[in-house]
């Protein structure tokens, strides 16, 4: 049942890459706070599990299997969300991949694929969603970038560049759509415990921990708290910003 006390009652959200990890936690938080939530991913089974959980919370939800690197698929996805859930108020660009390799060994395909998913995917979903948001003169877009965009990281030339691109894209779109009452921001997590970070070799992990003032990796909830703030009216006068959720590794 929808309660007026919930932060996102009456809102429709789309979270990309929401079958697991940060995206899943964000999708569930938005549903707990009253939003109807569309779950996107390329992992069908896990994505449908998230939808089932959202429905148990009592919200409407659909799973949309799509690769965010395809503009046409993103357009169709947003049209479907609007048709089936009744609108689009909140877009969380979360889908992302790594294909780590020292530059000397990085293939053109590894460069292209990471940028197509991580950066072009954000462009695709923003462009498709902003058609609706600009008409309704209201919306919140939050894209998940990374501390790697700000500090660089050995073996992540493709990933760091794609995530730095998200920051430039966010600032440009924030300027373009500010007068339409649309807030467009980014969150830059540091190292968060998910599948993406679980295979970091122990020696590298110890080195990373030595750089984090808070001496630990973050949890997905640390990111969802920042999303909750940026998706809510509490942040109505904030746009074009990057919020760091990183235990102090980059200040
Ligand atoms: P994750 O556990 O790997 O989850 C990402 C999800 O996105 C996976 O289900 C993945 O499917 C899906 N996905 C991959 N390519 C896609 C595509 N083309 N279209 C739609 N969905 C796609 O990652 P996470 O750790 O939760 O990270 C979420 C976001 O936070 C990413 O953008 C990541 O770069 C960013 N981030 C994470 C950390 C961290 O420490 N975990 C730090 C900074 C930023 P597959 O598993 O099949 O690829």
Image (spheres, helix red, strand yellow):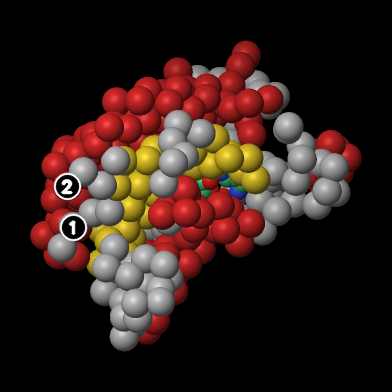
Left or right of residue 202, residue 7 in this image:
left
In the rendered view, would you say 238 is above or below 53? above
Mark yes or no: residue 98 visible. no
- Residue 14: mark in rendering: none
Disc 1 secondary structure class: loop
Q: Position of residue 228 (x, y in %)?
A: 49, 58
Q: Is mark 2 within 8 Å of ligand 1?
A: no
Say which residue label 1 marks: 87
How many numbered marks, from 0 up? Answer: 2
Looking at the image, which is closer to me, 161 or 204?
A: 161
Above or below for 110 versus 67: above
The residue at 70%/53% (across/down) is 218
> Is residue 58 placed above or below 108 in the rendered structure?
below
Q: Which residue in the rendered view is the most extreme toward the top? A: 104
61, above or below 77, in the image: below
Q: Residues within 10 Å of mark 1 (few under 14, many from 20)?
A: many
Q: Position of residue 103 (x, y in %)?
A: 61, 17
Image quadrant where one finds the N terminus: bottom left
In the displayed structure, does residue 111 sit left or right of residue 138?
Answer: right
Question: Is residue 160 something one can see in this rendering?
Answer: yes
Instruction: Check disc 2: other Cα within 10 Å, few if <14, some if 14-19, many if 20+.
Output: some
Between marks 2 and 1 in the image, the one whose residue lies nearer the viewer: 2
Of residue 114 and residue 60, the one placed in the foreground of this image is: 60
Earlier in the chain: of badge 2 and badge 1, it is 1
| CB atoms of marks 2 and 1 within 8 Å | yes
Which residue position holds label 2? 136
Which residue sits at x=35%, y=81%?
3
Alpha-carbon distance for marks 2 and 1?
10 Å
Residue 250, position as x, y percentages in the image: 73, 33
Which residue: 58% across, 40% down?
243
Say what secondary structure mark 2 lies in.
Answer: helix
């Amino acid at each position: 049942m929808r309660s007026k006390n919930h932060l996102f009652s009456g809102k429709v959200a789309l979270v990309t890459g929401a079958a697991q990890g940060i995206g899943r936690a964000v999708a569930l938080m938005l549903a707990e706070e009253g939003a109807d939530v569309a779950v996107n991913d390329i992992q069908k089974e896990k994505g449908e599990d998230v939808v089932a959980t959202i429905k148990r919370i009592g919200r409407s939800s659909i799973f949309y299997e799509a690769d965010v690197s395809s503009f046409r698929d993103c357009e169709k996805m947003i049209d479907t969300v609007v048709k089936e859930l009744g609108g689009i108020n909140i877009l969380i660009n979360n889908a992302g991949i790594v294909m780590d390799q020292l530059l000397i060994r990085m293939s053109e395909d590894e460069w292209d694929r990471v940028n197509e998913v991580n950066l072009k995917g954000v462009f695709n979903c923003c462009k498709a969603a902003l058609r609706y948001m600009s008409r309704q003169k209201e919306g919140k877009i939050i894209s998940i970038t990374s501390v790697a965009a700000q500090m660089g990281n050995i073996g992540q030339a493709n990933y760091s560049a794609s995530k730095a691109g998200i920051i430039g894209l966010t600032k440009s779109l924030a300027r373009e759509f500010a007068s339409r009452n649309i807030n467009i921001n980014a969150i830059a997590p540091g190292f968060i415990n998910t599948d993406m970070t679980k295979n970091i070799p122990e020696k590298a992990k110890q080195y990373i921990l030595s750089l984090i003032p808070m001496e630990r990796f973050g949890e997905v909830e640390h990111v969802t708290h920042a999303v909750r703030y940026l998706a809510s009216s509490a942040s109505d006068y904030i746009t074009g910003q990057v919020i760091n959720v990183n235990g102090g590794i980059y200040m």
